[in-house]
Image (cartoon, coloured by chain):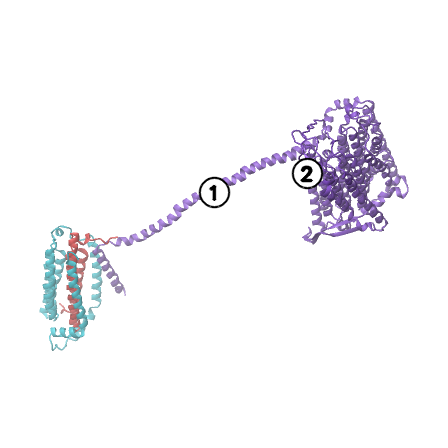
Chain colours: A red, B cyan, C purple
Amino acid sequence: MHPIGTVHYLALSAALLLIGTVGVLTRRNIVVILMSIELILNAVNINLVAFSHALHAVGGQIFAIFVITDAVAEAAVGLGILIALFRNKETVLADEIDLLKW
Amino acid sequence: MLIDTVLFYVFALLVLGGGLLTITRRNAVHSAISLIVSLLGVAGLYLLLEAEFLFAVQIVLYIGGIMVLFLFVIMLVNLDEAAKERQFSRQWLVALIAVAAVGAQLAWFIYKGRDAFRFAENAAAAVPEAVGNTEQVADSLFRQYLLPFEIASVLLLVAVVGSVVMAKKRI
Amino acid sequence: MNFLDQIWLIPMFPLLGAALMLVVGKMLDPQPVSEVAVAPGVEPIFEHGHDHGHPHHHDHTHGHDHTHDHTHGHPHSPLKFLINFICPGMVLLSFIFSAGAVWQLSQQAERVHQVVKFTWLAGLPFHMANGQLATFQADWGFLLDPLSSVMILVVTGVGFIIHVYSTGYMAHDNGYYRFFGYMNLFVFFMLMLVLANNYALLFVGWEGVGLCSYLLIGFYFHKKSACDAGKKAFIVNRVGDAGFILGMLLMLSVLGTVKFTDVNTLLRSGQFAIETGGFGVLSVMALLLFFGATGKSAQIPLYVWLPDAMEGPTPVSALIHAATMVTAGVYMVARSSALFSLTPKTLLIVAVVGVSTAIFAASIALVQNDIKRVLAYSTVSQLGYMFLALGVGAYWAAIFHLFTHAFFKALLFLGSGSVIHAVGGEQDMRRMGALKDKIPTTYWTMLIGSLAISGIPFLAGFFSKDEILWQAYSSPIGSPLLWAVGFATAALTAFYMWRLMNMTFYGKSHVPPQVEAHIHESPSSMTVPLSLLAIGSILAGWLGTPKLWNLPEFFRSFEAWLEPAFTPAIAAAPEAANAAGESSMELTLMLASVVVAIIGIWVARVLYVQKPEIPDRIEARFKPLYTVLYNKWYVDEVYDFLFVNGLSKGGGLALGAFDRDVVDGSVNGVGWLTRFDSLVSIWWDTWIVDGAVRFSSFFVKMMSYPVCILETGRLQTYAFFIVVGVLAFLGFYVTR
């Protein structure tokens, strides 16, 4: 085994990103979609921190903090939208919300 | 060091396994729990990367805040009928192909540039820092990155207002 | 007094007379109520609005009756005698001036005198046929040369005599001042015609005499037959005038001028070759001019108006249709001798037409019963002789015959007028007879006239007619055939003239009893002119005796006088070729014509005096031929069918067809077009305009459909596209 280097973290981050993307594109349940988005954000965080560690700079971690802040805000608002949507349409399935269809 | 490697793989397994489970569970609560597991794994990785502050933030904020929020909403929204529906959309195959293609491209990039990421190893003889990670983060956050910090706070304000508005019955 | 310079006055005197009649004539002779016979059903025209309730005279007479208008009760205007002085006086003045001018002309070495009063049609430039630029100019100019001098003497002299006669003949007629006004107007136009120095002014006179002929023929305008005859004369003349105008225009195009002297100079200059080969442009020109002459001088094919012109009063027939107007054509051809001499083919046509007309008219005159008709056809026949003379190049002989004919034909017409006056208006010879002792002066003068026209030696007609016949035989462009036909015509002439004389003066009287009581000799105003003309008929011929007789120069002066005016037909006629043989031939022919004239007279005497039943037997045996001759060879009917009916019916058909097809057709066509246009509009609107609109929307829809499909409204579709975009973006870097 190689000693764990930055590349491993990058590969892991990429894999997590892809998993999250598949979740966004594939699942119908909006809650799960939102959770998949969290996965993507976490992948990005892993990437940032890995580089921060490799470059001995703290900026990466600062950036990761901001990403987490952003994730919080987005989760709050997104879930609020979900609730509003559920109240109006009685559904949480993304397929069924096509009001902007041509 | 061997322990680092083993821990890395353990945490990686947690992360990826949790992720996979998240996107495949029928029950939303199961997805949420799987996500929590994944986030725990991510936190462990942070520790390995000597980002102690982030480790704490991840646990407290992400798992303790966001995931709890998720669980609240899951409880609020009745997902029983949704659980009976088909779970995957019709475009799953083509999405999978596209994502696989992107994945291939990313793999190619990483493979091509694997030697470029060795800078850290050369500077292995780095002087261990005099201050701890949290102090470093705070130092940088409140000096160099003060403006983004303030903007982030405004962003949080907006998010609060927005979620309150979204949740109201009558605007 | 220099008469030569005042020749412009010669036409002006009668014009003044006509103008005076126009202005003051009504005052001098107010018109009373007219009792003239009218056409059945037509109301007579009353003067002064009076209606005396008089009975209509519906005279259904046989033949062509002229009811002499005797309204014995009408008030005699005291000033009427002034008209007698004014109008004949004007003509007398013209005669005096003419005589003076001619005398002065004869004293000149070069017998040509022109007086130009002013430029009438001023210089209009035009291009001739050969591209040369010429200027058209016609002056109000008068030319006095030997030819026109003969003409003015004849016109004014005989005209004056006839005017004097008319004062007696028309004394009881209404429209006295109108008659004299028209007569003076006629003399004016005739003098303009013969004195003009260019074809355009000649044409003014030409048209004017046609107009006056119409006015005078239709003098008794209450009668439909008179009006029709006037119209016929004018219209037939017009047909000829068309030819004249075309000829004149062709002359302008080829020669560039219409002035006589200039035309003659050009034609005699040798620039134009004699057209012996085919029909050149000069021949066409001459033929067109001759066509105009056939109209005016009553030759085939335009002679049909002259017999009908006898509807006019007898003095009119005498003056216009015997002595002067009908000779205008002869004068014009003689004036154009330079042109005709260059065109032997046309000359041949002139001769053939002349001699054919002569015998044709003579054949019709054989069987006519109206005394004036016989004389009318006789005029046509004699005019044919004149054209025969022109056609064989003997221009002076034609003018000579014109000269003598004026005397004896006017005499015959005036005499017939006197006879008609004596028998109270009867014109049918079958109701005359044995008038010889009752109207002696008339009888003797008419006898002299008949002898003259028959060609009895030593009278006027003998010399002129014989000269023509000899020239027809002997001229280089004559032929024995022409002579033979002329000879036969002479025989016929003698016969029908003596038929007339016998039926009128000799034999048994067929005059109805009530008329017989009133037979009286005419007043002296009528008999004196007759006598004067008779003297003229005897003496006039002695100016043109044949060379054969070798009399002193004076007795051949007519030819010599006229010689400078003409261009000889063939440049160098070999005269001395066979002098001896020729003279004997001439004598033979002369004797032959005398003999045949005497035979004609004798046959007429036998048929109409001694054995009057023979004509009826001949008529019965040759009934078809008789009918054809009596009906004038049906020429009038043919013309009617071809032209009158043809034009009116054909015109009617054409107009009808035009109205139906063109006029209505265009209206219908417009309607159809409107409907068609609306159909096109509809189609356009539906398919093109709406189509464009629909197409634009269709196009947008088509173009947008692929894009519309992308817009599903679903979140995950959009997310997928983001991933695809990332894929593409990264792909770019992969390949780099």
The nearer-to-camera label among 2 and 1 is 2
Judge from the rendering whether residue C241 lies leftward or rightward of residue B35; answer left or right.
Answer: right
Q: Is residue C298 above or below residue A85?
A: above
Q: Residues within 10 Å of mark 2 (few under 14, many from 20)?
A: some
Say what amino acid the circle numbered 1 marks.
Leu
* Quarter of the C terminus of chain C within the rendering: bottom left
Q: Going by the picture, which residue comes out furthest to the left? A: B3
Q: Is residue B114 above or below residue C663?
A: below
Q: Position of residue B55 (x, y in %)?
A: 11, 68
Judge from the rendering whether residue B111 lies leftward or rightward of residue C263; answer left or right.
Answer: left
* Res. B69 image quadrant: bottom left
Q: Is residue B151 above or below residue C86?
A: below
Helix, strand, or loop for circle 1? Answer: helix
What label does residue C235 carry, if any?
Answer: 2
Say what amino acid the circle numbered 2 marks.
Ile
Judge from the rendering whether residue C454 lies leftward or rightward of residue C32; answer left or right.
Answer: right
Which is nearer the eye, C92 or B116? Answer: C92
Q: Position of residue C37 (x, y in %)?
A: 70, 30
